[in-house]
Amino acid sequence: MTHPFLDLAPLTAAHFASIERRVAALLSTEQDVVITQGEALLPLEGCIRSGARPGSTALNVVTGPYGQTFGDWLRDCGATVVDLAVPFHTAVTAAQVEGALAEHPEIDFVSLVHAEAATGNTNPVAEIGEVVRAHGALFYLDAVASIGAEPVLPDAWGVDMCIIGAQKAMGGPAGVSVVSVSERAWERFAANPRAPRRSYLSLLDWKERWIDGGRRALPHAPAQLEMLALEACLERIEAEGLDALMARHAAAAAATRAGALALGGGLEPYVYEAADAAPVATTLRSPAGVDASELVARALAVDPSLPLIAGGGALAKEMIRVNHYGAAANRDVVRSSLEALGTALDATGRTADPRAALRAVTEVWA
């Protein structure tokens, strides 16, 4: 008995390469683009282990939990790490990055997360890129959450390693990810004796066996279903239009923030300034004396399908996250999420105003 998902012809090298070209167009990049066969942590770690080494000094910008992870990887590679940490309720500035580079002129690698979905902030990559380019360091960017929700332009911003995943704003699969690599990043990888080789983490294997070979023979069997899902995702983005997709995410973020403020009940935006808030997720501070994880549980009891989650780790008691990315960047989803949070607040004895929240969502979205 045949099955449409299981009895598929093998994915050819030409088909694989055609999907890479579509991703390159999404990123407006002339750099080499490689689709890696795993979740985005694969190229995120692979790039650090390829580019960092003993004797190098890295500036690691920490605006959320992923920045902390990158610092751990960099130290594990033997690099000296200068952490530039800012409160999770704000964004880093180009001036802060410039100051750190001036204080440590030996820095040759800069790691940054564009949008931190976990904390709800986004960083001004274009301005930071100018500073990093002037300094001459390699620029590594985690754009997994931001791609599709806000501009991601590695060439224009001077990004040497730009890693994206399809599972958030793109509304695609989680099992494949993509990295664009500049020529000088490839040179850095090749000159690093500790860069992974003959390894699943190796980007150099893709360079030598795939790119340099004219993309005629894949290094290994691709994750076929995920690749086809990525292709379908790209087709959907092309049909909607990237500008329209980004506008939908911006509307969802603005409407959620305005709706939460109108809802009341003690909820406040976790990220202080709207300009620093990411378009993929709005984080809210739970009212004093109310456990955020319990509030989320009450809201999900109203509708378990809502994209609501409590903050991770130490933030679980104080942060609520409304994930409005991909299909959830939708006015009805935002409205339902705020209504459920209003019901949950009422159950804790707080006075919320769901009607005001819904009016605010409608006005902002329009």
Image (cartoon, grey):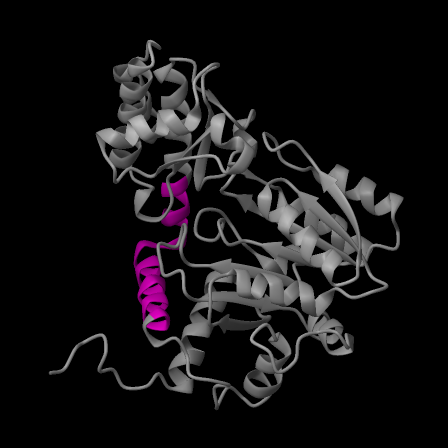
Image quadrant of residue 293?
top left
Residue 95 visible? The answer is yes
Q: Is residue 168 magenta?
A: no
175 sits left or right of 336 in the view: right
- Highlighted range, magenta: 226-249
Q: As drawn, which residue projects farthest toward the left?
A: 1
Q: Main secondary structure of the magenta part?
A: helix
Question: Where residue 206 sits in the image (x, y, percent)?
Answer: 57, 80
Foreground residue, 197 or 149?
A: 197
Residue at x 54% of width, y 53% of height? 143
User: With respect to residue 54, does 331 lie above or below?
Assistant: above
User: With respect to residue 67, does 293 lie above or below?
Assistant: above
Residue at x 11% of width, y 83% of height? 1
Residue at x 74% of width, y 75% of height? 187
Question: Where residue 23 sits in the image (x, y, percent)?
Answer: 46, 67
Image quadrant of residue 309?
top left
Question: Where residue 32 sits in the image (x, y, percent)?
Answer: 58, 73
